[in-house]
Amino acid sequence: MKADVHNKSAALLGALIAIGVVLDAVAQAPQPAPKATARPALAPAPAAPPSVQPPPSTASQPAGRLGMGALLEQFTTLDERDISVLVTSGDETTLSSQMAGKIKKIHFGLGDNVGVKAVLLEFDCEEQDAQLQSAEAEYRGARETHLTKLRLQALGAAGELEVTVAASGADKAKSQVTLRESQLAYCKVTAPFTGRLVKLKVKQAESVSLGQPLVDLVNPGSLKAQLYVPAAWLNWLRPGAHFTVKTAQDGRSYRARVSKLNARVEGVSQSLELEARFEGSTQGLLPGMVGTAVFPDRPKP
């Protein structure tokens, strides 16, 4: 019995010694690095700004600043661009109706040549003619009354007041005749100058109102050029300066001379309006054409 107990004690002691040896070996072995615990990603800290910041580039500027810069660049390079010219007519007008009525007859068509005082169209004015005849009849009666009062006054049968009232009635009737004649003159629309009919805005038998446009008339013989130049050209450009207009339609060149300078510069575009007259032959040139102005005295940029 004692022998069994002794054997169990020895076995237990041997096991304890073995466990101690293992624990010492583990303690002396190199320990692995502790595994990092996963953490949520954090935004990187902003870098410290440098002491001197470079100037912002054009690409990084706001849209508003970029547009202003492009606009200023456009103004700066305006002197280097071609100057556009618009051909207009010195005598150009739109004739409107001076009465309400129906168109009776149209005498000219699109593109026709018309002379000064030529009748372009007529209104149906039977009513106005009847009113004129009535006014003339009243005037004749008032005039006879006045003459009768004058004869009676000579015989002592009429007083001064009666003669004066009769004369006033005759004058009033005459003024009505003049009014009806002036209204009847509106029935015919005449050309104020020699030119060509470029637009007909009404048709025969059409009823129009007072002030309605009827026809457009231009005189191709009095052409002028309208153009805008940089305001900086005021340093050398003066009235009377000669230049050449090259049309965009056929490439032909025409001589022109500056006749007028506007007294105001456009605030946004910094441009100045000019008016020029053509010199020499203008055959083939029509109002509405566009071209390019070539100034021989233009300073080089």
Image (cartoon, rainbow, N blue to C red):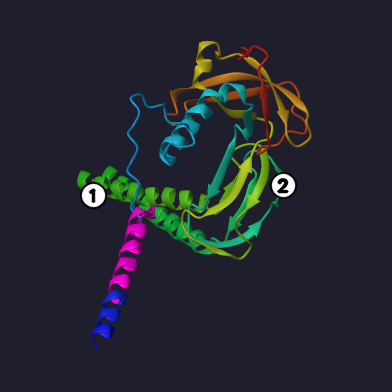
Would you say 159 lies left or right of 58 here?
A: left
Q: Amino acid at mark 2?
A: Gly
Q: Quadrant of residue 285?
A: top right
Reply yes or no: does residue 51 show up in magenta.
no
Q: Which residues are magenta?
A: 12-39
Reply yes or no: does residue 13 show up in magenta.
yes
In depth, the one of 291 and 180 nearer the eye is 291
In depth, the one of 224 and 200 nearer the eye is 224
Q: Provide the secondary structure element on which disc 1 rests.
A: helix
Q: Amino acid at mark 1?
A: Glu
The residue shown at (36%, 63%) is 22
Return the mark for residue 162: 1
Q: In 3D space, how far apart are the residues under numbered discs 2 and 1 (Cα atoms)?
A: 61 Å
Kindly report the secondary structure that dominates the magenta region of the rendered protein: helix
Check the image and report above or below for 103 versus 175. below
- From this viewpoint, is residue 8 visible? yes
The residue shown at (58%, 65%) is 206
Would you say 68 lies left or right of 81 here?
A: left
In depth, the one of 141 and 128 nearer the eye is 128
Would you say 258 lies left or right of 142 here?
A: right
Which residue, given by chain and number where applicable, does mark 2 sit on? 111
Image quadrant occupied by the C terminus: top right
In depth, the one of 6 and 165 nearer the eye is 6
Return the mark for residue 28: none
Check the image and report above or below for 284 versus 140. above
Q: Provide the secondary structure element on which disc 2 rests.
A: loop
Q: Which one is closest to the eye, mark 2 or mark 1?
A: 2
Q: Residues within 10 Å of mark 1 (few under 14, many from 20)?
A: some
- From this viewpoint, is residue 269 visible? no
Image quadrant occupied by the N terminus: bottom left
